[in-house]
Structures are given as C-alpha cells and as structure tokens.
Amino acid sequence: MRSDAIAYGIAGVLFGLIAGWIIGSQQAGGRPLPAAAPQQPTAAGSTQGTTRAAVLDETQVNALKSVADREASNPKPRVELANLYFDAERYDEAVKWYTDALKLNPNDANVSTDLGVCYYYTNQPDKALEQFDKSLKLDPKHAKTLLNVGIVKAFGKQDLQGATEAWQQVLEIAPDTPEAQAAKRALDSLQSAHPGAAGTQKPGS
C-alpha cells in the first residue's frame, strides 16, 4: 500500500520529533524518557534509539517485591516495579506488574496506558491499541494516550489517517501542552512529507 511507503519515508523525521513523548503517562512521575521508540519491523525499522536502558536495581526490585507480597491489595509497589522494568527495557516483566496493578486498581488510566506502550514495545500493536481504548474509556481526554494511539497507528499499523485523527484530537482537547506540541510537530511533518496524507484539515487549525 502507498501508506506503507509513506510511513517508511517519514519515520525517521517523526521519530526524531516526537520520541520524547512516546512513552506516555508514566512521565507524571518525572522519570526520564528513552530517546526513541524500539524498532518496529513493519514500520520504522531503522530508527532504533541509541540511549542505553537504565540499569535495573535488583536491591530495589527485591524490596518492592517484598512489599508487594506483604500488601496483596496495594497496587503502588506493583506500579513501581513495572516502572523499574520498563526503564530497564524489560518490557515483558513490566507487562506482568502493570497487569497486576490494574487488577487491583482497574480505573488507573495512566497505568493502563503504560501497559499499552509495553505491548507496542513488544511488537503487539493491536494489543497496544486495545489497551489504549480501555484507557480512553476511563479518561476520554487522556492526551498522552491519544498521542500514543497516533504513534502506534502510524508506525505499528501504517494507518496514517488514523494517526492524524488521534493527533488532531490531542490538539483539540489539550492545547498548549507538551503533548499538543508533539502532536502538532508530527502532523506538520506528515503534511510536509506527503501533502494530503494528514487529511484536508490543516494541522493545528
């Protein structure tokens, strides 16, 4: 499909512009972001980030696991464990702990979105989008979720129209936010690389 060629052509540009916002809602805690998304074999396969993963602190992990064992109904240590594994790019383990945390607190849109990002990072774009749908049911105006929806649709599914719609929603519901700035740059880059790919509405209008 033509959209496949477009996605390949603009992948490097878009990843460079919006990489700082790919991770999503876990930034509420102020933890640093990786420089770029992991490779996606059906999209931007040459855009692997060069930033090293955080070193996993096994002492902290063991301490949090002990707390989780003692406090079976407390989602917080499970979220913290998931965050540690995420930062170390051990996404399968992060999935386990985010899932456990959501079982205890299913209404946490931030954790739901982080789980969705993990699915994307493990080459499961469909599952990522399903999880983002759950996040948006909890909070329809969750800007980081919508930003990630656009990224997964663009690079995981080569659905540029769907990505455009998601990024335009970010502009509409969360103007003057870092997420809106990232969405605007992504839309501008997409429009510049392929006029018409971003629909008839001018990005940011």
Image (cartoon, rainbow, N blue to C red):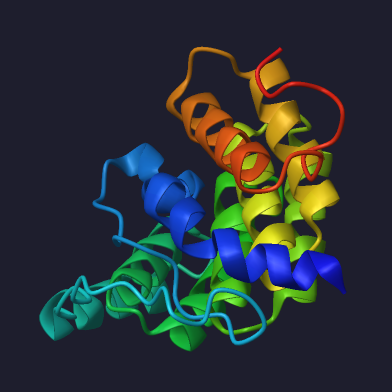
Q: Is residue 148 left or right of residue 4?
A: left
The answer to whether residue 157 shows anywhere in this view is: no
- Is residue 62 shown left or right of residue 71? left
Q: Position of residue 151 (x, y in %)?
A: 62, 55
How many numbered circles are shown?
0
Residue 81's image quarter?
bottom left
> Could you tell me if residue 57 is visible in this image?
yes
Residue at image point 73% right, 29% down: 168
Q: Is residue 41 found left or right of 195 in the rendered image?
A: left
Q: Is residue 86 above or below residue 36?
A: below
Q: Which quadrant of the structure image shows residue 99?
A: bottom right
Q: Quadrant of the N terminus?
A: bottom right
In this rendering, would 143 be left or right of 166? left
Q: Nearer the viewer, residue 134 or 147?
A: 147
- Residue placed at 54% from the left, 25% from the top? 180
To which quarter of the image does residue 125 belong? bottom right
111 and 142: which is toward the camera: 142
Residue that appears at 69% across and 81% down? 124
Q: Position of residue 57 (x, y in %)?
A: 14, 78
Q: What residue sits 37% from the left and 44% below the top?
A: 27
Residue 37 lies, with reference to residue 57, above or below; the image says above
> Considering the image in quadrants, where does the C terminus appear?
top right
Residue 117 rendering spot, x and y as whole percentages: 57, 64
Q: In the rendering, at what x and y percent does residue 97 appear?
A: 50, 75
